[in-house]
Amino acid sequence: KNEVEQSPQNLTAQEGEFITINCSYSVGISALHWLQQHPGGGIVSLFMLSSGKKKHGRLIATINIQEKHSSLHITASHPRDSAVYICAVYTGANSKLTFGKGITLSVRP
Amino acid sequence: GAVVSQHPSRVICKSGTSVKIECRSLDFQATTMFWYRQFPKQSLMLMATSNEGSKATYEQGVEKDKFLINHASLTLSTLTVTSAHPEDSSFYICSASQGLRNQPQHFGDGTRLSIL
């Protein structure tokens, strides 16, 4: 069993829809990263959080430490949101990350 | 936000060639840099962790003589794929961190390596 599980694996949405991507982990963590990877390969850090909720533009990330679960929400989705969304957790004293497999999101116009 | 520059973005070369990839942190001191490899539709696989001024720590199964890592300054780490073969073709991506607990990793744009 992977230490970081993401669901669903693939997701297709219509432009404008509210989207939720989930991440569950089975290890103790110090923080969690939501990352976005576009088809070209570059990775952008969306959020790093260790508790509660963060919001940036149309993106909202929440984490429940007790339940070992985090969600990434996209409001008013747009085709440019199409990408792979990766959940990764910090588990040690250093900055080493453990990655989920990522979710491929396609937003149709 | 913090910027990490990775160069080159794409390399196509013949089998047997050695290829050097550079990873630079442009606006912060990167005490720790990470090198990852990613196969199509797979997640990132950590190859090695490098701390400035010391030898890199390689993950199990990664050949240190094959993938040479140098982290001689707080802003630059290099990965050299020595005597590359077609099976080394992959997407390589670096990230940089200030190395302290809970400091985020900042990722480069990656290098797509194709060995003919």
Image: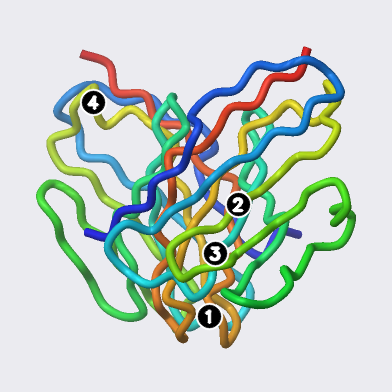
Label 4 is placed on what type of residue? Arg
Secondary structure beneath dot 3 equals strand
Q: Which mark is residue A41?
A: none
Query: Residue A54: image x %, image y %?
Result: 20, 67
Residue receiving disc 1: A29
Q: Is residue B95 above or below residue B13?
A: below
Separation of residues labelled 2 and 3 (CA atoms) = 10 Å
Instruction: Work out how far the residue at label 4 is from the one at label 3, CA to CA, in angstroms.
Output: 30 Å
Residue highlighted by disc 2: B78
- Amino acid on which the number 2 mark rests in the picture: Thr
Q: Where residue A74 appears, x then y in whole percent?
A: 22, 44
| Apparent side of residue A32 relative to residue A51 in the rendered image (left or right) | right
Disc 1 is placed on an element classified as loop
- Whichever of callouts 2 and 3 sits on the residue coming sooner in the sequence is 3
Chain for numbered disc 4? A
Q: CA distance from mark 2 to mark 4?
A: 32 Å
Report in which chain the residue with disc 3 lies: B
Nearer to us of marks 2 and 4 is 2
Cβ atoms at labels 4 and 3 below 8 Å apart? no
Residue drawn at the location 10% of the way across and 50% of the way down: A57
The secondary structure type at the circle numbered 4 is: helix
Give the image location of residue A25, x and y in percent.
Answer: 57, 68
Q: Give amino acid for label 1.
A: Ile
The residue that mark 3 highlights is B33
Q: Nearer the viewer, residue B15 or A32?
A: B15
Q: CA distance from mark 4 to mark 1?
A: 31 Å
